[in-house]
C-alpha cells in the first residue's frame, strides 16, 4: 500500500494538523514494537513544540515496554551516533522546515530506515499498548559527549582560522562554537539564540544572506551554516559567495582521495565532469540523503552527499552530519582560501523554482513539456521536476551551459506547473 505518513526523511508536518501528539505517540509505540527495542535514545531540536512531542513519543516508547533515554536538544547526527549503543534512535525535528513544522526521524544502529522499514512501522500504528511499561531516563552528558566525539574524530588544528558559524537557531546552537573553539579557531556565532519560534528563520543553511554579510563585514576566512537539526552544511567563502553541497563534496572528494562518490539527481553536471576528469566514479540516486546512504553501503563507498548540504562521510559515522562535515572542510583547506579550493568545480548554470501546488501529481501536459525541454537540451543540459517530500511544493531544476536558456526553460515550465497543479 505504500507509506501514508513517512516522506523523504521521516514523518513531518505542521504541528496540530498532520503532526499531532497522538500520531507521535503511536509512532513511538509502533517503531519500538517493530524494532524489538529495549532501550531507545531520543533527541530533539529547538522548536517550541519539541517538549510536548518528546513527551508523546516517550509515552509511546514506554507503552511498548521499552526504556526511553532522553538526550535533550541534539543534532540528528548526534542521535544517530548514540543509536549505536541503543536499539533505536529517534529525533524530534522538522530539519530545515519552518518553525510551525515538526517531525520524527528514526535511526537504526546502521543509519536511517529504508522504505520497507517505514511501511512496516506504519502497519503497527494501531497496535495496542503492552502489558508492561518501560522507564524514562535523562542523559545530561549527551551534548558534551557529542562535541568530544566529533572534535576528536574529525577535528584538526584550526589555530589562526577566523570563521563565522550560523546555527539556524537550531540544534547546533552552542555546540558548533564550542567544537571549533576547542580546535583553536576564532569563532563568531550567529543564529545561536533559539527561542522556540525562530529556528531556520532568516538564518541557517536555507537562508545564508545574514551569514554572507557577516563574513564580509568581519573579514572572516569563511562561514559555515547548519540547518535546524544540524544535518546540512552550506559554506560561504571570504568574498561572501556561497559554496553549496556540490562544492563541499568536490573539495572533500579530492582531499580524501576517494575513488567513489554518491550524489543525487540534483547534483550539478559540472561535478560529474570534474569527477570524470579525476577518475572518480560517481553513483547517482534519487533525491534524499538516505538513498545516498543506501548506495554508499551497497557500493562499499565512504563519501556522498546532496547539493542541499547533506554530506555523508561513513568513516567513523553512520549518517550525514553537518558538524563533522564542517570540520573536514576546514581541514581540507590546508591554508588555502575557500574560494580557491572551490574554484576547482566549474558549474553548469542552474535555474531553480519551487511552485506551491494543490496536488503533486504531474499532468500529461507537464510531463510532455519536460520531455520536450530535455530533448532540446540533450548534451547541453537537463530538466528535472520533482515533488517535495516534505511540503506541498513542486521543485523545478533546469541546468544548461547557457544561463539564459536555462532561465527561459525554467520560467516556462514553472508557469505550466502553476497553471496545471496550483
Image (cartoon, rainbow, N blue to C red):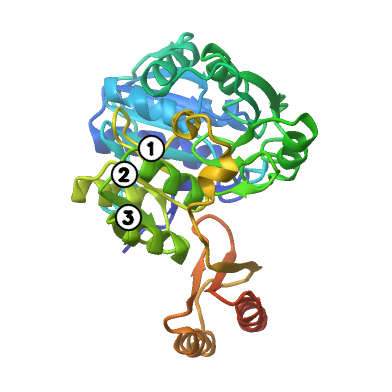
Name the quarter where the N terminus is drawn. Answer: bottom left
The image shows residue 164 at horizontal and vertical percentages of 67, 29
Point out the tag, 3 or 1, that comes first from the N-terminus. 1
The image shows residue 23 at horizontal and vertical percentages of 48, 42
The image shows residue 249 at horizontal and vertical percentages of 43, 46
Q: Does residue 416 appear to the left or right of 7 in the view shown?
A: right
Location of mark 3 (residue): 278
**Quadrant in the rendering for residue 79:** top left
Q: Residue 42 carries which label?
A: none
SS for tag 3? loop
Q: How packed is label 3: few (under 14 Cα within 10 Å), some, or many (20 or more)?
A: few
How far separated are the C-alphas under marks 3 and 1? 36 Å
Q: How packed is label 1: few (under 14 Cα within 10 Å), some, or many (20 or more)?
A: many
Q: Are marks 2 and 3 in contact (CB under 8 Å)?
A: no
Residue drawn at x 56%, y 51% as measured from the top left: 18
Location of mark 2 (residue): 113
Q: Do the residues labelled 3 and 1 touch (CB within 8 Å)?
A: no
Residue drawn at x 64%, y 35% as measured from the top left: 223
Q: Nearer the viewer, mark 2 or mark 3?
A: 3
Name the quarter where the C terminus is drawn. Answer: bottom right
Point out the tag, 1 or 2, that comes first from the N-terminus. 1
Q: Foreground: 358 or 221?
A: 221
Q: Are marks 1 and 2 in contact (CB under 8 Å)?
A: yes
SS for tag 1? strand
Residue 261's place in the image compared with 86, above or below, is below
Location of mark 1 (residue): 106
Amino acid at each position: 500500500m505504500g507509506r501514508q505518513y513517512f516522506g523523504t526523511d521521516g514523518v513531518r508536518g505542521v504541528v496540530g494538523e498532520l503532526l499531532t501528539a497522538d500520531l507521535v505517540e503511536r509512532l513511538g509505540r509502533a517503531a519500538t514494537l517493530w524494532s524489538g527495542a529495549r532501550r531507545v535514545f531520543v533527541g530533539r531540536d529547538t522548536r517550541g513544540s519539541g517538549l510536548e512531542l518528546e513527551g508523546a513519543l516517550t509515552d509511546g516508547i514506554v507503552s511498548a515496554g521499552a526504556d526511553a533515554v532522553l538526550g535533550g536538544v541534539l543534532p540528528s547526527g548526534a542521535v544517530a551516533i548514540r543509536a549505536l549503543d541503543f536499539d533505536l534512535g529517534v529525533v524530534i525535528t522538522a530539519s530545515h522546515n519552518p518553525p510551525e513544522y515538526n517531525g520524527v526521524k528514526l535511526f537504526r544502529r546502521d543509519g536511517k530506515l529504508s522504505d520497507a522499514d517505514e511501511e512496516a512501522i506504519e502497519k503497527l500504528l494501531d497496535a495496542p499498548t503492552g502489558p508492561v511499561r518501560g522507564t524514562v531516563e535523562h542523559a545530561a552528558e549527551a551534548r558534551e559527549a557529542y562535541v568530544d566525539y566529533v572534535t576528536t574524530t574529525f577535528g584538526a588544528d584550526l589555530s589562526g582560522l577566523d570563521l563565522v558559524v550560523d546555527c539556524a537557531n537550531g540544534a547546533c546552537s552552542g555546540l558548533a562554537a564550542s567544537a571549533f573553539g576547542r580546535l583553536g579557531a576564532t569563532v563568531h556565532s550567529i543564529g545561536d539564540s533559539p527561542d522556540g519560534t525562530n529556528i531556520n528563520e532568516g538564518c541557517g543553511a536555507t537562508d545564508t544572506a545574514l551569514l554572507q554579510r557577516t563574513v564580509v563585514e568581519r573579514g572572516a576566512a569563511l562561514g559555515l551554516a547548519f540547518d535546524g537539526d544540524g544535518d546540512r552544511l552550506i559554506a560561504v567563502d571570504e568574498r561572501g559567495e556561497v559554496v553549496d553541497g556540490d562544492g563541499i563534496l568536490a573539495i572533500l572528494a579530492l582531499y580524501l582521495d576517494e575513488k567513489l562518490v554518491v550524489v543525487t539527481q540534483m547534483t550539478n553536471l559540472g561535478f560529474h565532469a570534474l569527477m570524470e576528469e579525476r577518475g572518480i566514479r560517481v553513483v547517482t540516486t534519487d533525491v534524499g540523503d538516505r538513498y545516498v546512504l543506501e548506495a554508499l553501503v551497497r557500493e562499499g563507498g565512504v563519501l556522498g552527499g546532496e547539493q542541499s548540504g547533506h554530506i555523508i562521510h561513513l568513516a567513523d559515522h553512520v549518517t550525514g552530519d553537518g558538524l563533522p562535515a564542517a570540520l573536514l572542510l576546514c581541514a581540507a583547506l590546508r591554508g588555502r582560501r575557500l574560494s580557491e579550493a572551490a574554484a576547482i568545480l566549474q558549474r553548469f548554470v542552474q535555474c531553480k523554482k519551487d511552485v506551491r501546488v494543490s496536488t503533486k501529481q504531474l499532468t500529461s501536459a507537464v510531463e510532455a513539456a519536460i520531455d520536450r525541454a530535455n530533448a532540446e537540451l540533450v548534451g547541453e543540459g537537463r530538466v528535472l521536476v520533482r515533488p517535495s517530500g516534505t511540503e506541498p511544493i513542486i521543485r523545478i531544476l533546469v541546468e544548461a551551459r547557457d544561463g539564459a536558456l536555462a532561465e527561459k526553460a525554467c520560467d516556462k515550465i514553472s508557469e505550466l506547473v502553476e497553471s496545471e497543479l496550483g
